[in-house]
Amino acid sequence: MNTSVHERESADGPRPGRIVLAEEDIRRRIGELGAEITRDYAHDPPLLVGVLKGAFVVMADIAREIRLPVTFDFMAVSSYGGATHSSGVVRILKDLDIGLEGRSVLVVEDVVDSGLTLHYLLRNLQMRSPRSLEVCAFLVKESRQRVDLPIRYTGFEIPPDFVVGYGLDFDGRFRNLPHLAVLDGI
Ligand code: IMP
Ligand code: MG
């Protein structure tokens, strides 16, 4: 009998474990955030800036809960360092397509851990003279931030475990899980 690489990986390797947030919890909270953003930006529909790759899932869901003519852009960043720790050295892999001058910008992030990635990003975006610059973070890890960050909208505060699903990956995998789970087997 042959055991494929995939089967072996899912049996002993890093894999999704205990569920931290069920699909239904996420849906409810995203709905609340969407309603809040709709109220706050009623007279000033924002440009949503998604931080790839992780934010593509929350971006798609929250955008459809914002009942305003929002526009979209994306940027891709990568933190140097190991797969489960941020080093604070951020590389822009893909920059925005449009300028931010005079725009109301709402950055959509998947997870804030040390906060170093977001800190770098906000400093970078602020230099482009947006009219306003706010952050919506799906997840914020408790007691982990090494910098002060102005996060206007937070989905969930979670314990500092490494988690996967709903856009978050380990080594490129598990982003398409509809719920959030801790990563087991590392
Ligand atoms: P920070 O710079 O330490 O805040 O880390 C932010 C980045 O690290 C995120 O944008 C993710 O790409 C990654 N990250 C941090 N924690 C997790 C996690 O629990 N699962 C998956 N990726 C994570
Ligand atoms: Mg990542």
Image (cartoon, rainbow, N blue to C red):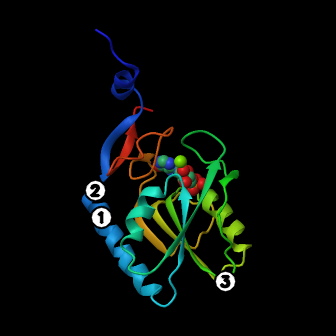
Q: Under 8 Å from ligand 1: the CB of mark 2?
A: no
Q: Quadrant of residue 73?
A: bottom right
Proximity of marks 1 and 3: CB atoms separated by less than 8 Å: no
Query: Which residue is drawn at the image coordinates 45% and 33% (left, top)?
Result: 186
Residue marked by disc 2: 23
Residue marked by disc 3: 102
Residue 1 versus residue 66 in the image, above or below = above
Which dot marks residue 109?
A: none
The residue lying furthest to the left in this view is: 24
Residue kind at label 3, given as amino acid type: Gly
- Work out whether residue 154 or residue 178 is closer to the camera in this orientation and state it: 178
Structural distance between the alpha carbons of marks 3 and 2: 37 Å
Query: Which residue is drawn at the image coordinates 72% and 73% (left, top)?
Result: 128
Precedes in sequence: disc 3 or disc 2: 2
- Work out whether residue 156 or residue 62 is closer to the camera in this orientation and state it: 62
Q: Residue 154, percent across and down? A: 44, 69
Structural distance between the alpha carbons of marks 1 and 3: 32 Å
Closer to us: mark 1 or mark 3? 3
The residue lying furthest to the top in this view is: 1
Residue kind at label 1, given as amino acid type: Arg
Structural distance between the alpha carbons of marks 1 and 2: 6 Å
Proximity of marks 3 and 2: CB atoms separated by less than 8 Å: no
Q: Quadrant of residue 119?
A: bottom right
Query: Which residue is drawn at the image coordinates 49% and 91% (left, top)?
Result: 43
Q: Under 8 Å from ligand 1: the CB of mark 3?
A: no
Query: Which residue is drawn at the image coordinates 49% and 53% (left, top)?
Result: 54
Residue marked by disc 1: 27
Q: Residue 5, percent across and down? A: 40, 20
Proximity of marks 1 and 2: CB atoms separated by less than 8 Å: yes
Q: Classify mark 3: residues with Cα within 10 Å, few (<14), some (14-19) or many (20+).
A: few
Q: Classify mark 2: residues with Cα within 10 Å, few (<14), some (14-19) or many (20+).
A: some
**Left or right position of 156 against 79:** left
